[in-house]
Amino acid sequence: MARFLQLTDLHVVAPGTLCSGVLDTGAILRAGVERILAQMPAIGPLDGVLVTGDISEDGSAASYDLALRELARLGLPVYAVPGNHDSRGAFRAVFGGQAWMPAAGMLDWVVDLPDTRLIGLDTLVEGQGAGRLQPDSLEFLNLALNGAGARAAVVALHHPPLRTGIRFMDNIGLENPEDLAAAIPANCGSVLFVAGHVHGVYLGRIGPHRVVTAPSFCSAFALDRRANARVGFLTGPTGYALLDTGPDESWTAQPLFMGDGPIDF
Ligand SMILES: [Fe+2]
């Protein structure tokens, strides 16, 4: 079993600026890290932090510096895939020292833990909100899943292969989910895909494989499926996810800020 925190959609901006002119996402990240640190004794040992994209809002080097400094306080290995707000160049620079970061090409990677294969996929198309898996990434996934053996396979990507019904988000979803489905080897066991992008918890599937999305660390979207739904974000609820892999697999989304208690029954 391996246990990961999944953090997603941090949207950190350069210090002194605000995300969408409203959110101090650096301060939100700092407070959230504090919250998770306080939770850690209750959660148990962890093997890493998996960040499923949109670490930065503006792609600036300063935003990555701030984000990485805060994430480092968790004292865990950090594994990350880029989201539509990330800059591939800045991302590669900031994670360049990590063993999992490829030297060139798409930011696809594999990390093997004793009984878990964690696969990161790059869905970023720079200059647009929607995501797309390029042929190289699809081939990478096929090879990585074929080589997973008896390990539990978890695939991390920013743009989930599912629809939320929120039109302005579905309009910038994953453009080629059918290519993703075709890249999964027919004989492989059930794969868990974990994603972000939609700033909420959604469940989907690709044949026998599971897809789940984690809440954003900084904002949310109203579940408004009308054609005239207001385009914009909510300041909460925010959260993160906790993943245990293997035969006792579990995945739970946790709010960053809880109600009062525990109160005796
Ligand atoms: Fe996002």
Image: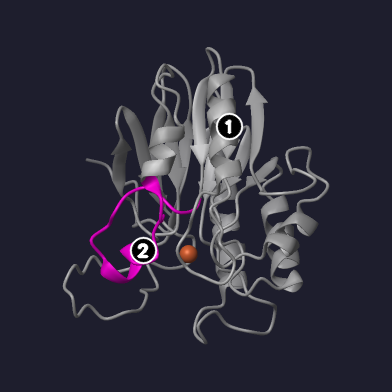
User: In the image, residue 93 lies at what x, y percent?
Assistant: 79, 58
Any magenta on residue 205?
Answer: no
Which secondary structure is most common in the magenta stretch? loop
Q: Quadrant of residue 181?
A: top left
Q: Is residue 160 visible?
A: yes
What residue occupies the far front of the structure in this picture? Answer: 135
**At 74% from the left edge and 44% from the top edge, which residue is drawn?**
101
Camera-side residue of 162 and 220: 162
- Say which mark, if any, is on residue 118: 1
Q: Quadrant of residue 185?
A: top left
**At 53% from the left edge and 53% from the top edge, which residue is drawn?**
123
Q: Which residues are magenta?
A: 158-177
- Say which mark, if any, is on residue 95: none
Q: Quadrant of residue 124?
A: bottom right
Any magenta on residue 175?
Answer: yes
- Say which mark, if any, is on residue 237: 2
Q: Is residue 41 visible?
A: no
Q: As shown in the figure, which amino acid type bears the numbered disc 2?
A: Pro
Residue 201, placed above or below residue 14: above
Residue 209, placed above or below residue 88: above
**At 60% from the left edge and 30% from the top edge, which residue is drawn?**
45
Residue 253, placed above or below residue 207: below
* For marks 2 and 1 on the same chain, the one whose residue lies earlier in the sequence: 1
User: In the image, residue 30 lies at what x, y percent?
Assistant: 62, 64
What residue occupies the far right of the structure in this picture? Answer: 97
